[in-house]
Amino acid sequence: MRWGSLSRKRLPVLLGVLLTIYFILLSLQPGQSPGHWLKRLDFLLYDLRFNAALDWHPPERGGQPIIIIDIDEKSLAQEGQWPWSRHKLADLVTMLAQYGAVVVAFDVVFSEPERNPVDDIRKRLALDGERWLAPDGWRRQVDADTHFAQELPATDVVLGFFFLDEANVSVGQLPAPVYELPPESARRSVVITKPGYAANLPLLQDAAAGAGFVTTFADADGAIRLAPLIIRYGNELYPSLALATVMAYLFDRQLQLETVALGEVDVLRYAGVGGQLARTDAAGRVIVPYKGPKRTFPYLSATDVLNGNLNPDALEGAIVLVGTSALGLSDLRATPVGTQYPGVEVHANIIDALLNDEFPYRPEWEAGALLAQLLLFGLLLSFWLPRLGPFAAISVSGIAVLLGISGNFYLWTYQHLDLPLAAVLLLVGGLTIINLGYGFISENVSRRLLKGMFDQYVPPAHIERMMNDPAAYQFAGESKELTVLFSDIRSFTNISESLSAADLKALLNSYFTPVTKVIFDHEGTIDKYVGDMVMAFWGAPLDDERHAFHAVQAALSMQQVTASLCEEFAARGWPAIKIGIGINSGQMNVGDMGSSYRRAYTVLGDAVNLGSRLESITKFYGAEILVGEHTQALAPEFVYRYVDRIQVKGKNEPIRVYEPLGRIGDVEEAVLKELQMQQRAVEHYFARRWDDAGLMFTRLEQQQPRRLYQVYIERIADLRQQALPEDWDGVFRHTAK
C-alpha cells in the first residue's frame, strides 16, 4: 500500500486507538495528584457548568430562613476593630435571642481567654511594688468570657473550632462527638482524619448547644468545591459547623451514616441527621451546592443588631450565622461562583442543602461511566473520521462534543450527578487534530503544485481562496460593486517601432513586473495584459469595502513607479514612457468566464467599459489618471481636480470626471490654491459667463500650463459662436472610443 493511502486511512486509525488508550490510562490511574493538569482542567469545566446551570435552572432556597449576621466594614467602623470584646458578643447573642433567632452559629473560634481588666490592674500594681486585693466578685463581674458564657443559653448557640494537621496539638475543649467508631470500623474507615485541634474555651463550650469544625479544604487551584460533613479524631466523629447547626435546629444529636464495604475499607455514602441525609464521597465530603454568587443569602450588619435597628420580626424563627465579609479579616474564599466569597456563606449553602436534600454527588460508577465514554467516542471517531473530509470531520467531532457536554449538563442539572468531562473533550479534540493534520499533510503536495501552476497568472488572494476553500470557488459569476483600473503606455506604437523585438520584450517585462507588484500590494486582482495595457480590479474574489481607495492609491503608486523606471530605461538606451490610467466603480459581473478550453477570472459590464473609456481620454485632457464620479465619492481620502462633465460613446448618462492628485494632507498648498481658482472658473463656465470663465482659464494656463486649461479655452471660444439651448447642461460628448 502507498504511503498516502496508509496515512489517510490506517495510520490515523492506529494513532486514534493509541490516543484513546492513553486517555483511559491517564484518567483512571490510581493516586493521581490533585494538582494534575487533567484535574485542573476538570475544575475549570466544573465551574463553567456550575454557573451555566445556575443561569439555566436557578435553584430556589428552602422555606427555612438562613440569615448571615455580618461583621462587615460598617460594623468595624462603628463598633471598633476586631476582635471584639466578648462582652459585645454576649450583647449580640442577647439581641439575636430577643429578635427570635432559633439557632445562632458562630463562624468564629474562641480558643484563648480574653484578658480580665482586674488581672491587668493587679499586674501593673505588682510591677510598681504595690499589692491590690480586689474582691473576687469584681473579677467575675467584669470577666468577658464569663459574661459571654452566661448569655449563650439565651438561644441555641453553636460554636466553631478547627481541626489541624499538626499532631498532638490540642487547644481548648472539643465538643462531645456525635459518633464513636468501634476499633474495627475505625481501622476500615476512610473518613478524613486529623491529629490535632484548636477548640473553644471549656467555659464557652460547656455553655453552648454544640460545636462544629470550620476547617476548609480547597482544591489544587485554591477553590472550595467540596466540604467535609464529618472528620475523625481518634475513633470519634465530629460534625462540621453546618451539620452541627442542623442538629441543633432539629434537636437531634444522633448522626446517621450509611457505609458500603468495599474490599478492606468501608466507603461512606450518606451522612446526616433526622432523616436529612446528604450524599457524600468515601471520605465524607459533599459537593457544596452554591445557590448563587455571594450575598445570595440575606446579610444583616452586626452593628444594626447590636443597636436594635432591625424590624422586630427580621430574625423570627431564623437560623443565624455570625461571620464576616470584611476584607481585613481573611475569611474570603475562592469558589466556583466567584472569588472573595465569604466563608460564612459556604456554611449557609450547606445548611440550606441539608434541610432540603439538594446535594449533587459523584456516583460510585463514575469510573465505569468515564471508561464507557472514552471507549465509545475514541473507537467510533478513530475509525470514522479518516473516511470523512475536513468539513464533515469537524462537523462530526462538533456533534460528539455537543453530545458529551449536553449529556453531562443534563445529568448535573436534573439528576444531580457530577461526572468528569475534560478527558472526553480532550480525546475528541485530539482525534480531530490527528485526522485534520494528516489530511493537511497528504494534500500539501498537490496544493503546492496548484500554486506553482497558477501564481504567475492569478492573484495570491485568489489562489489562497481556491486552495483553502475549493467549494467556494464556483464557475458561476456574481454581480457586485467593484472598482476597475485600465492602464496604457502613451505612444506605444512609436516606442515599439524604435526598439528591436528583444528590447521591446525586455522593456515590457521591466514595466509590468513593478506595476503588477504595486497592484498586488494594494490588494488588487490582475485581470489581463493586452499588449501594453494592464487591466485590474478590486473587491473580488475577496471582499474589499475600500476597493475604490485601494485602486486610486495603486494608480498613484503606479505613476511613481513609472517615473522611477525612466532613469533605468535611459541608462539602457530605451525611451522614457508615460502611462494613462482610467478608474471606475460600479456594479460588475465577476467570475470564471470563457470556454471549456480556456477560462479566466474576469469582470464584465457597463461600469467596466466606462473605465476603459476613461483611460482612453486621459491624453485628451492631458491627465495622468481619470476616475469616475462614483469612484471619487467612494474614496474621499484624496484631493481631486475636477476635469469635465462628459458623455462617452455608448453611454447615455453623463458623468463627472476627476483627476486624483494625492492623499489629503500630502498635496502642496500652491496646488490647492490652483484648484480653488479652477473651481471658480468652472462655475463661470457652467453659468455661461464666457468672459469670466475664459479669463480665469487663461490665467490658470499662464500660471501652470496644462492641457486641461487649453481644452476649456478652446471650448469656450467655440461655444461663444453657438446658440445654446436653454437646457444646456455643459456636457461634452466624446465620439471616439
Image (tube, rainbow, N blue to C red):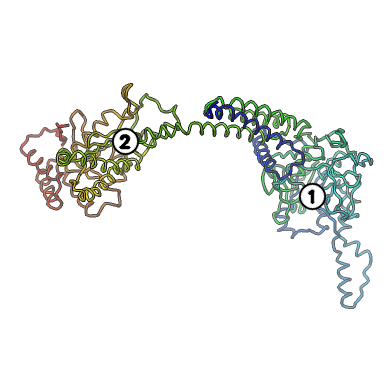
Assess disc 1: are there few (<14), some (14-19) or many (≥20) residues with their C-alpha within 10 Å of its C-alpha. many
Which one is earlier in the sequence, the residue at label 1 or at label 2? 1
Q: Residue 728: horizontal and vertical position, in percent?
A: 14, 34
Closer-to-camera residue (297/377): 377
Quarter of the N terminus within the rendering: top right
Picture quadrant of residue 556: top left
Which structural element holds mark 2? Answer: strand
Q: Secondary structure at mark 1?
A: loop
Residue 686 seen in the current view: no
Badge number at residue 180: none
In this image, 177 relative to 77: left or right?
right
Judging depth in this view, the residue of 112 and 590 nearest the camera is 590
Near-viewer residue (101 or 340): 340
Tell me where residue 282 appears, x and y as whole percent. Answer: 82, 37
What residue sits right under mark 2 in the picture?
A: 526
Mark 2 Cα-neighbour bin, 10 Å: few <14, some 14–19, many ≥20 = many
Asked if marks 1 and 2 touch (Cβ < 8 Å), the reply is no
Q: Name the kind of residue labelled 2 in the image.
A: Ile
Measured Cα–Cα span from mark 1 to mark 2:
76 Å
For this view, does 465 lie left or right of residue 590?
right
| Residue plotted at (43% across, 28% down) | 472
Instruction: Let me know if residue 224 appears in the view.
Output: yes
Which label belongs to residue 107? Answer: 1
- Amino acid type of the residue that numbered disc 1 sits on in the rendered structure: Asp
Marks 1, 2: nearer the viewer:
2
| Residue at 7% over, 34% down | 723
Above or below, 698 against 387 in this view is below
346 over 117 or under it: above or below: above
Q: How many marks?
A: 2
